[in-house]
Image (cartoon, rainbow, N blue to C red):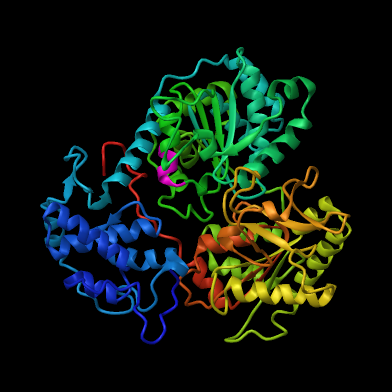
Amino acid sequence: MSGTAPGPGAVDARLATRAGGLLATFNRAGVLDSADVHVAQRLGRLTGEDDDRVLLAVALTVRAVRAGSVCLDLDEVEQLAVADAEDAGDTAPSGPVGPADQDLPWPAPTAWRAAVAASPLVAVGMDGPDDRPARWVGDRLYLDRYWRHEQVVRREVDGRLRAAPLAVPPDRLAEAARRLFPGAPGADGSRQRLAATTAALSRVTVLTGGPGTGKTTTIARLLAVLHDVTDAPLRVALAAPTGKAAARLQEAVGEVVDAMEPTDHRRVGTPSATTLHRLLGWRPGSSTRFRHDADHRLPHDVVVVDETSMVSLPLMARLLEALRPDARLVLVGDPDQLASVEAGAVLGGLVRRPPAADGLPDRLRAVLGADVPHDPEAVRALRNGVVRLTETYRYGMELGALAEAIRRGDPDAAVDVLRAGSATVELVQTGDRLTEADVAGVRADVVAAGTRLTAAARAGDAAGALHALEDHRLLLAHRHGPAGVGRWAALARGWVSEAVGGPDDQAWPPGLPLLVTANDRDTGLYNGDTGVVVADGAGGSVVAFGNPAEPHLVRPHRLPAVQPVHAMTVHRGQGSQFRRVCVLLPPESSPLLTRELLYTAVTRAREHVRVVGSEAAVRAAIARPVRRASGLQDPLTGP
């Protein structure tokens, strides 16, 4: 369902026509969708609840989950109503949303809380009844299912952090860590050394850092350290939330392992990566339950999960339940990027949680000495097994400065970097309407990359075409509208076609870039994979995917659902890297403009980023962090 209003005479599917009272008022205002209203009404009928205030709270909770929150915080309900619409983006109802736009009849806070707590629809507290569809804990209202997911994650993570130390010879660990991560204390190599040592001593490690900070290198060498200090062979699983991310993880780790000393190379072997869903084991007929669970544990000694910021709360709960109690879990990702499109911001919650394991910093200090920082914030993080890498290796100083300014929420610093311009950062300031001059640089980049891509594809050079596919990408916030992917993808395709020529009636013209939009086990392709049509040398075409060194070739008739990818949303681009990136910002009023979206967009670039939009839009994005309600950051005993 898009944000486009229905035509004349059409019934607006976003309106619950039979709703009354507060539900109808908030539905007509655009705060609630019809689905939110219908779920609340159904639960009310099942439990005998007819209080408008309670049904409104439940409908808002359903809306919050759809928008990525885990619960509804009644202390911030009016602000979250707006934030939910921002997170929902193109799927949000059109029209005014929340109190920022109009005066809505929000219930009086004290009476509202009392009504929710007294409702037969709601279980109150951690020990409330287990047979009610909603739960009220510390001024937060949950759908009971999501409260249980959150409890699993909190319980399992805290239990792993507080468990007895893993038996690892300290001298042997220190020697292996320093051999595989050389560098003086205080340098970023010592942070990587600290991460590997944490993984050896703790049952859960959270390795964070921005793009290009060496997370993948750390993963590969961390595995070598674990193999070195463990006498028995280790069963290791590498996983990621998407097939594309898993393929990139396997490729990147493999490159590091191939460059290791023969002994370490032999120990680590050739790690393969898979999706979390395949690791847990698909169960026919269910999208939420898996073959591996609390009763049928995963056999692995070490599980490494990359791109953890994209992992939803329900999936993380299933993974933690399936781990053996003595297995090591290493979660890797960037908590400042866009979170999962489903409910939860698990990585961010784990990074922000109160300290859980008092003794871990001391155990680390006994092994590494001066490598362990003493500043309170770093020690606090270590007590949760969190190590952040900060030194960027991938791109230049200006691009790194821009990303850091956005990450810490400093619009003045970000604008200063953009205004200064450089070989790596460029701002094209626009007015109310884009002119040909505004998009001249975008067009030049699109045509240059498209020309290289088409030349390689027509020559049957699959490797060259896949390399060219990562040369440039046009990223946008919206799917629809003047600043949407639909419009700009058509423009980009037209620019390239005009430059390269050739017949327009081919179903699969060489050089056509494609995005997979559905998982397909038969071909090994997954939602989010990108490929390019390549001439097969015999008058036909194949589509090349994956690693340019070993292209995965699929005939067009075997493809799952695909679409041309001359442009993509920032969400779609997450987990990918391109040599050059053009970011087309919508107007500053767009609810999709958030700090996380802008940070994710500019950090997709390895060498150059061009931001096309107004300075006001840049400032608006940085000033608007995504708000997702969650209780994960609270101690296990409750708020």
The answer to whether residue 373 is left or right of residue 474 is left
Q: Position of residue 633 (x, y in %)?
A: 36, 44
* Quadrant (top left, top right, bottom left, bottom right) of the N terminus: bottom left
What is the magenta segment's predominant secondary structure?
A: helix
Q: In this view, does 286 lie above or below 485?
A: above
Nearest the viewer among 50 and 253 is 50
Q: Viewed as shown, does residue 300 lie left or right of 255? A: left
Task: State how many labels appear.
Answer: 0
Q: Residue at x 59, y 66 (%)?
A: 413
On whether residue 305 falls in the magenta region, the answer is no
Q: In which image quadrant can residue 150 be found?
A: top left
Judge whether 56 appears above or below 155 on screen: below
- Residue nearest the observer in this picture, 541 or 187: 541
Residue 291 spot, x, y in % from top left = 45, 31
Query: Within the image, what quadrant is residue 499 found in?
Result: bottom right
Q: What stretch is highlighted in magenta?
A: 312-317
Residue 143 screen position, x and y as percent: 27, 50
Q: Is residue 313 magenta?
A: yes
Quick check: can you spot residue 396?
A: no
Residue at image location 75% in from the left, 75% down from the top: 443
In the depicted structure, whether residue 24 falls above or below residue 404:
below
Q: Is residue 404 above or below residue 422?
A: above
State the residue in front, 145 or 631: 145
User: In terms of depth relative to the viewer, which is nearer, 415 or 501?
Assistant: 501
Q: Position of residue 601 (x, y in %)?
A: 61, 62
